[in-house]
């Protein structure tokens, strides 16, 4: 793991009038590290994720990203075209609902290939070969390459969305409840796949989830949010095995009682 942070987050806050979305969040994210942001619905975790990924501009604060040329850029000082290019190349975003991250009316192969075309690839044969390779890496049969996502199950759609995001070799992936809405057996298979890909590719990831089991399986560190604030932050196993804050203790005990 590099000794230079990939992402430096400084005092990020988002207000909706008098309501707090998130407040005074600061942390560094390291290359190859997975950070889980957990909390109940309304805790501010998705607002924070959207601010970090520039889908939402914060009220105050800054997020600096370590570019491939070695410089740091404040994401909020980039223009829209620069941010879009970063999202197509160096970043990925996996939505809870795969339909939000896929083009449902084009083929599986086209969904994956579009990301390659966005970075300048034009050789049809190479694009199709890369699409087949990535479909197989996410456990989708190559003979489904010309099928549209609407013909896939929920788990297959989510795996296709992952392939679409990873085909360009991003360094940072944002995941918003990546297993939400899936059956337990499908969740387990998807989590094993994601964990393997993250480890094999050395990806950094920020994962929003309300499921502490997902956080334990995928993440190195964990932040617990309540009412827009980060109330506990530490190594995932430490936070889950020895929670210090009463709210975190309540979250952990509620899982144990299920």
Image (cartoon, helix red, strand yellow):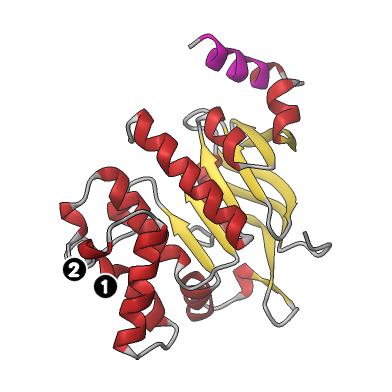
**Residue at the disc numbered 2:** 146
Q: Is residue 254 magenta?
A: yes
Mark yes or no: residue 17 visible. no
Mark yes or no: residue 148 visible. yes
Outermost residue, top side: 257
Q: Main structural element of the magenta stretch: helix, strand or loop? A: helix
x%, y% of residue 34? Answer: 64, 49
- Residue positioned 76% across, 28% down in the render: 238
Magenta highlight range: 248-257
- Residue positioned 30% across, 61% down in the render: 102
x%, y% of residue 200? Answer: 59, 58
Q: Residue 110 carries which label?
A: 1
Q: Is mark 1 on a helix, strand or loop?
A: helix
x%, y% of residue 93? Answer: 46, 58
| Quadrant hosting residue 29 | bottom right
Q: Is mark 2 on a helix, strand or loop?
A: loop
């Amino acid at each position: 793991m590099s000794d230079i942070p990939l992402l430096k987050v400084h005092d990020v806050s988002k207000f909706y009038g008098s309501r707090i979305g998130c407040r005074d969040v600061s942390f560094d994210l390291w290359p190859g590290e997975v950070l889980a942001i957990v909390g109940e619905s309304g805790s501010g975790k998705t607002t924070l994720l959207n601010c970090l990924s520039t889908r939402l501009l914060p009220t105050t604060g800054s997020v600096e990203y370590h570019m491939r040329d070695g410089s740091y850029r404040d994401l909020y000082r980039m223009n829209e075209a620069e941010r879009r290019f970063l999202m197509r190349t160096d970043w990925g975003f996996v939505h809870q609902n795969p339909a939000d991250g896929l083009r449902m009316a084009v083929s599986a192969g086209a969904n994956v290939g579009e990301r390659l075309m966005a970075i300048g690839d034009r050789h049809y044969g190479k694009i199709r070969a890369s699409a087949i390779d990535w479909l197989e890496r996410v456990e989708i049969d190559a003979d489904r390459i010309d099928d549209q996502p609407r013909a896939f199950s929920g788990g297959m759609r989510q795996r296709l969305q992952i392939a679409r995001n990873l085909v360009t070799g991003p360094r940072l992936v944002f995941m918003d409840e990546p297993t939400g809405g899936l059956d337990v057996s499908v969740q387990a298979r998807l989590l094993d796949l994601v964990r393997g890909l993250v480890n094999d590719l050395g990806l950094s990831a920020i994962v929003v989830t309300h499921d502490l089991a997902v956080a334990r399986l995928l993440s190195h560190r964990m932040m617990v949010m309540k009412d827009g604030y980060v109330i506990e932050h530490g190594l995932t196993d430490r936070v889950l095995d020895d929670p210090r804050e009463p709210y975190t203790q309540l979250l952990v005990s509620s899982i144990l009682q299920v």
